[in-house]
Amino acid sequence: MKKLYCSLSSNMVLTQSQNFIYLILPFIHGINCFNSYNKTTLIQNSMIVASHQKGWKIINQRSHGLLAAMLAYQYNIDLPNEIIVPTLITIAEHDDGIAETKESKNLTDAGAPKHFLAPGGSKKTDLKQHYNVMEIATSKCQLNALLTSMHMDFIFSDKKPGEDKELDAFLKEQSKNRKHILKHLDMDQKMADRLYSFVEWCDAFSLLICMDKIQPEGRKMEISESPEGIMSQTYYKSDDVISVDPWPFKTDTFKVFYEYKIIEQLQFKSVKEFDTVCSHTEVQRHEFIFKK
């Protein structure tokens, strides 16, 4: 078994200007703080929300996760079936666990859809989603549980012990579970870390795309460190045509997409109203071509 697991080779509704500030806030301190997106995403349990000329553009975290899995599927990485499939599932489902449009905290106090980078909310972490996503992962297989648990550890790595006792207990339990799984799978920590770097790379890249953060005019920007230990860079070759340097994918060109909704109503009296409007809004698709 161990030899097998060592085969990895590689008070008012937000104005548009206010919303824009939320979108660019991390970049005030430079591109390298991108990884904080992933941490904030799960901690806030919220959607990707952007201003739109007709109202709000809403991208669910599950759609972002699916895009990440599309990137992972195309990645040139040599893994056996029993490893790559659970890893792809982890990448696709790591932000699942709740229905975002049904969560009251996903509306601002003024009744607008809350972007996941928007400040505010309780200092105490709502662990419902995290318990849910871990239950889902654990019921599939041990490798899925391991990688999902490693993602939990990553997103909460900035939390100081003692700030939230329930969170501390959750993380301690996860650490214990990971050690047990590694022993059960006969997998070393180095291999687990390389697999998780693959998860994080795809997740980070997908979020860059969904948040429209790739720089215009062909300017390169960092994605994250790849499983091979290389800092990847991405850029637009032309409108909706994306490239990566160095090129990490199996083919020279392929297509990906994410789905979204344009919500024309700016303010909602309740999350039930918001959910109803969302459920009756047409789904749209944004497609991208990746080209070497």
Image (spheres, helix red, strand yellow):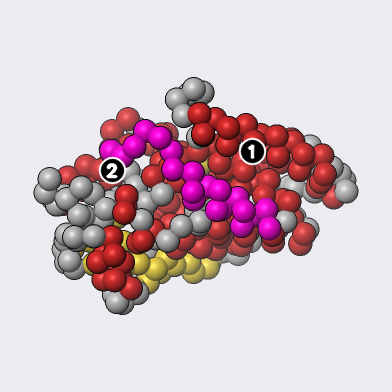
Which of the labelled discs sits on residue 174, or is there none?
1
The three-letter code of the residue at mark 2 reads: Ala
Which span is picked out in magenta? 119-139
Location of residue 76 by image quarter: bottom right
Classed neighbour count for the residue bearing mark 2: other residues with Cα under 10 Å, few (<14), some (14–19), many (≥20)? some
> Which residue is depicted at the point 36% across and 56% down?
103
Q: How many labels sit on residues?
A: 2
**Mark 2 = which residue?**
118
> Which residue is depicted at the point 18% across and 68% down?
264
217 vs 282: above or below: above
Secondary element at tag 2: loop
Q: Does the magenta stretch include residue 2?
A: no
Q: Give the image location of residue 178, x and y in percent.
A: 70, 39
- Whether residue 241 is visible: no
Left or right? Give the position of 199 relative to 146: left
Looking at the image, is mark 2 or mark 1 nearer the viewer?
Answer: 1
The three-letter code of the residue at mark 1 reads: Gln
- Whether residue 189 is visible: yes
Which of the labelled discs sits on residue 289, or is there none?
none
Q: Does the magenta stretch include residue 120?
A: yes
